[in-house]
Image (cartoon, rainbow, N blue to C red):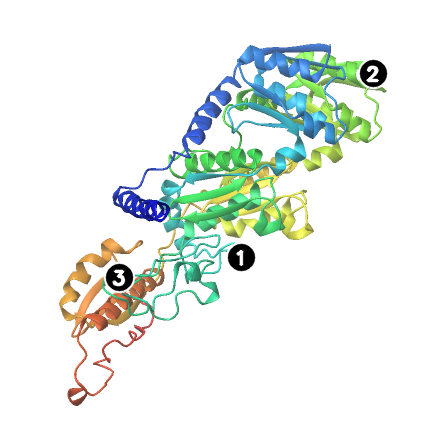
Amino acid sequence: MSYRWAVLSCCVWSIIASLAVADESPTAGPDLTASTRVARKAEQKLLQSMQMKIKAQWADVTPREVLTSLTKQSEIGLWIDTEALAAVGYSTDHKITLNLGEVTVETALYFLLTPLSLDWQGQTGVLEVSTRERIKETLFTRIYDVSALSKVLEPQLEAVNWQPSVPAGILGGGMGGGGMVGGGVMFSVANDDDTAEPSLLAQFGGMGGGGLGAHPPVSPVSKGWTIAPRILRAETALIESIQSSCAVGWQATEGEGGDISALPGRLIVRQNYRGQSQVQSLLQALESLLVHGVKSKSISVQRAGYPATEDAAIVKALAEPIAMDHEHLPLDKILQAIAKSVGVRILLDLPAFADEDIAANQQVSIHYKSIALNVVLKHLLEPLRLTYLVHEGTLIVTTQAKAAEELEVLIYNSADISGNAKELVPIIEKSTPGTWMSIDGDGGTVTPLGASLLVIRQTQRCHVEISSLLNELREKADPPRASEPPPLVQRIYVVQDQTAKQDLMLSLPEMVTGWDSQRGSVLQLGHCLAIKQPAQVQDRIGEIIGALNTANGFLTPKPSAGNAPTKTAASPSIGAPPAAPVKLAPTP
């Protein structure tokens, strides 16, 4: 008997305890984002430290010793992925020599790791060195605020009637004509009194190709009526520019690599460290041109802290005349003499030389009294299948095959050239020596953005040709013309709620992006509103008035069967989908 009472007592106390717990407020979970915030601050500190100038001179040392020296001088944490290196049979214990003079830590890392097919990443706040493939496969997500860019781009894209050219699938499958770029979903939790509403799990996975349907469904008052989300025109244009110009893989275009989605004023990018750096640099360059109004014919897309002034000094030196008179001297000795004469750093890409079986010490002769340095280098290097690049404040002598693979991104401003940016695309592709993805299936890309910007990824040699071509077009261009505003169209909308007409006339200009208050008009015609606005604005107005009519149909009690009014075009049935607006001829 006592045993049964003990069991019953335990059951009663367990029920009471469960009730007591149920009455308590839920305990807050741990802050799972704390480590991310700490890592972002540590990464910023890492990137700042990498701009420290150091004396990069090492002879007959191992890469590990160089990395240790670099991180010790700059007070950066170091982690070497020995597992990944061992998997490809690579050892950091072989001897190398590197003499760069005074450079930043980041520049020294570039010249140390690139020939070894190694790379680095720093999203944890620590300098992580691994194989290029391992770094490429490590993806993570970042969100970029592009609201300022979108605000400036939107009217430009409308003026040129821009349409997305991205492959199917980038814009996602759902949400009708807008919503979240990249396959966003819309979902809601069913109310207790609304058993007919689909469940949360049933709505996950997007809304497919059907989108929202022709008309929003009638819903309970607490639910509201959906106004179709606006098309993310500017954000989609930015996605196209990023995917065509950033030298990383994308799922949407190549079937592998990173991915990118959008919300109004935001881009959500999943990429590796190199890709995230390129995306950030591109967006910052675009912002400087479009938002901050930087006046420049072109701007190079480079990481923060890149030695652009040193590159500019080398380009200037290449145009200066030089006297050279050498007979049967090794190539590397002549290049050494040129570096000393003009005061620039020259580096030989010996791994590329080895791939082409080109000796750096082969005998050459050169005799010039006063010729520009770029011409001297052309005549000296081209017979040997060599050329040069200007990168990281250094003149790099490499093979022509290697240089053809090294593409860089420049943004060109064509506002002072007749025509818009899109019209210049075929001219550039057909009038320059580079290979193009759209023509040859390989090579560079050119992406128009807005009314006057061209985002071009090509070789340095081709960029020289592009700059010359655009400059000649500028000299022969007509005076710049103001961009033509989009034509107006007039449409008539039935407003079922007659008390809302005045409110609509006042609120529509505030609710609809791109409303033309100077040329447009809104007139009341009985039960209707006659509106004159651009076509894109009219589409948005139709969505808003359609949602309002649907809501009015639910809120207005249906008449009894005996008193049902005759259905006419002027008096649509209550609760029925709103009729499409009447479209009039375009207004000049």
Q: What distance separates the C-alpha of mark 1 from that of mark 3?
A: 30 Å
**Disc 3 residue type (three-letter):** Gly
The label shown at residue 271 is none
* Kind of element beneath mark 1: loop
Q: Is residue 485 left or right of residue 460?
A: left
Q: Nearer the viewer, residue 147 or 519?
A: 147
Q: Which mark is residue 330?
A: 2
Q: Can residue 388 be seen from the camera position used here?
A: no
Question: Which residue is disc 1 drawn over?
Answer: 169
Is residue 504 rendered to the left or right of residue 82? Answer: left
Q: Earlier in the sequence, mark 3 or mark 2?
A: 3
Badge 3: residue crowd in 10 Å (few <14, some 14–19, many ≥20): few
Point out residue 398 in the picture as x, y percentages from the top left corner: 73, 27
Quickly name the residue at label 3: 224
The one of 38 and 319 positioned closer to us in this rendering: 38
Front: mark 3 or 2: 3
